[in-house]
Image (spheres, rainbow, N blue to C red):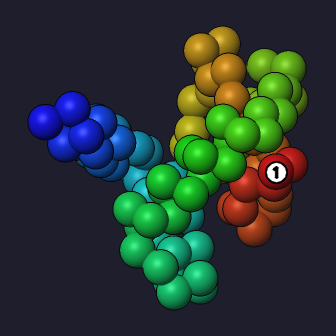
Amino acid sequence: MNDRLRMLQRQPRRITITLSYHVHEALLSRSEEEGRSVSNLCAFLLEESLRHPAILPLAQASAAAPEGMVVTPSHAFEKKVCGNGHLSGA
């Protein structure tokens, strides 16, 4: 039973988040370009940002954010957003 419990604890977890229209559109666009689901892309981007955090000053993060995204001090793992809407700095 102990092995089964450990295996269950390592199962992927589901979460729900709310995104702005513009961020969702950027994710849809990029997922289509890369031939992957939005869910898979989001999981990849989150894992990469936690592995390689590129913490930006608030003003710089706000300037680099996609249109419609509000950046607050709680965005501790904010990555730089390129002109094409993709995250960089990984």
* Residue 9 quadrant: top left
- Residue at the spot 43% in from the left edge and 45% down from the top edge: 20
Mark yes or no: residue 7 visible. yes
Please state the horizontal and vertical placement of residue 84, each as a whole percent of the image.
75, 68
- Residue at the spot 19% in from the left edge and 42% down from the top edge: 4
Q: Secondary structure at mark 1?
A: loop
In depth, the one of 40 and 62 nearer the eye is 40
Q: Residue furthest left?
A: 1
Please state the horizontal and vertical placement of residue 78, each as a whole percent of the image.
70, 33
- In the displayed structure image, the side of residue 10 where residue 90 appears, left or right: right
Please state the horizontal and vertical placement of residue 42, each as a whole percent of the image.
49, 55
In depth, the one of 78 and 25 nearer the eye is 78
- In the displayed structure image, the side of residue 47 where residue 16 appears, left or right: left
Q: Which residue is mark 1?
A: 90
Residue 65, above or below 73 = below
- Kind of residue at disc 1: Ala
- In the displayed structure image, the side of residue 58 where residue 27 appears, left or right: left
Residue 86, above or below 7 = below
Q: Residues within 10 Å of mark 1 (few under 14, many from 20)?
A: few
- Residue at the spot 59% in from the left edge and 46% down from the top edge: 47
- Residue at the spot 81% in from the left edge and 26% down from the top edge: 55
Residue 74, above or below 50 = above
